[in-house]
Amino acid sequence: MDAITYVPPHKGLVLDQITKRFGSVVAVDRVSLSVDLYEFLAVIGPTGCGKTTLLRLIAGLEKLDDGHIYILGECVDDKKPVQRGIRMVFQDYALWPHMQVFNRDFYSNLSFSMKIRRTLPVNIQEKVHTIASRLGIGKHLFPRKPDELSAGQKQMVGIGRAMTIKPKILLLDEPLSNVDPQHRLSLRKELKDYHNRMGTISIYVSHNLPEAFSLADRVAIMKDGKIVQVDVPSKIRERPANAFVKGFLQCFEL
């Protein structure tokens, strides 16, 4: 299909009829969506509905079979992930296994992105310690490598790593799934505060509908690779688009 000739930059992210197939399976099916600058969007739906594949297409980690993606008005279909200005928190952490959480030479999970960008050492120190404090990453964890961390600790380091560099778009794939309930509420607040401080676009994938409703400006609900409703949480509660959305809400007693 032909690319859109003009997308206004205030539409921070535009998905234009994007499709991704894996063999005979259509994981993302002609999805169109527009996300404004500074917006926090949650994408929810059952397992296998295409949420994670949607994020990976935006990040450039999967190749489109059809359609186009625009970031700040620019078509990025042919741009590599590193050229898109995106940071992503993966559900499976994706930490560098050979690196410590943080160390003095900055060759570590929390600081490496800043090191390769030649950030001043004093600024790296300040940034890492601020993020670690906000996320509850104790200094006693700094010398550890990922295989010495619990699942929840790995998740917090993954979130912290994404926060070290301001992105155009922050993608969060089930970022709190392995965090214990004691820290989950405080981390949820920190993610929202970070979004507001950075003035970025955040897209948050989750199975947890109440969590998504509490965080997001708008919520997109997916089923079988399609977005079946996207709106502010209050309107989705009041006017579910179809029986599937209504049933999905009822599962969470919303």
Image (tube, rainbow, N blue to C red):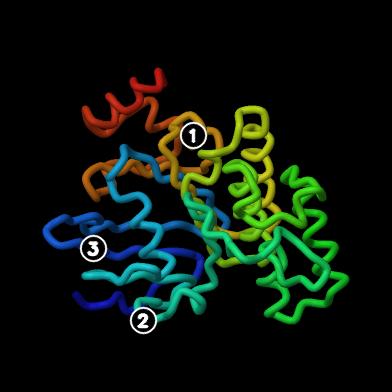
Label 3: state its secondary structure. strand
Question: Pointer 3: what residue?
Answer: 19
Which residue is located at x 60 percent, y 52 percent?
A: 147
Q: Residues within 10 Å of mark 1 (few under 14, many from 20)?
A: many
Nearest-to-viewer mark from 3 and 1: 3
Question: Pointer 1: what residue?
Answer: 213
Marks 2/3 in contact by CB < 8 Å: the verdict is no
- 140 to the left or right of 250: right
User: Residue 214 in the image: x percent, y percent?
Assistant: 54, 33
Label 1: state its secondary structure. helix
Label 3 to label 1, Cα distance in Å? 26 Å
Nearest-to-viewer mark from 1 and 2: 2
Is residue 203 visible to the viewer in this orientation of the structure? no
Q: Reading the chain from its start, which is encountered first: label 3 or label 1? A: 3
Label 2 to label 3, Cα distance in Å? 15 Å
Which mark, residue 78?
2
**Quadrant location, the C terminus:** top left
Marks 3/1 in contact by CB < 8 Å: the verdict is no
**Residue positioned most to the top:** 253
Which mark, residue 249?
none
Residue type at mark 2: give it: Asp
Residue type at mark 3: give it: Thr
Which residue is located at x 34 percent, y 41 percent?
A: 221
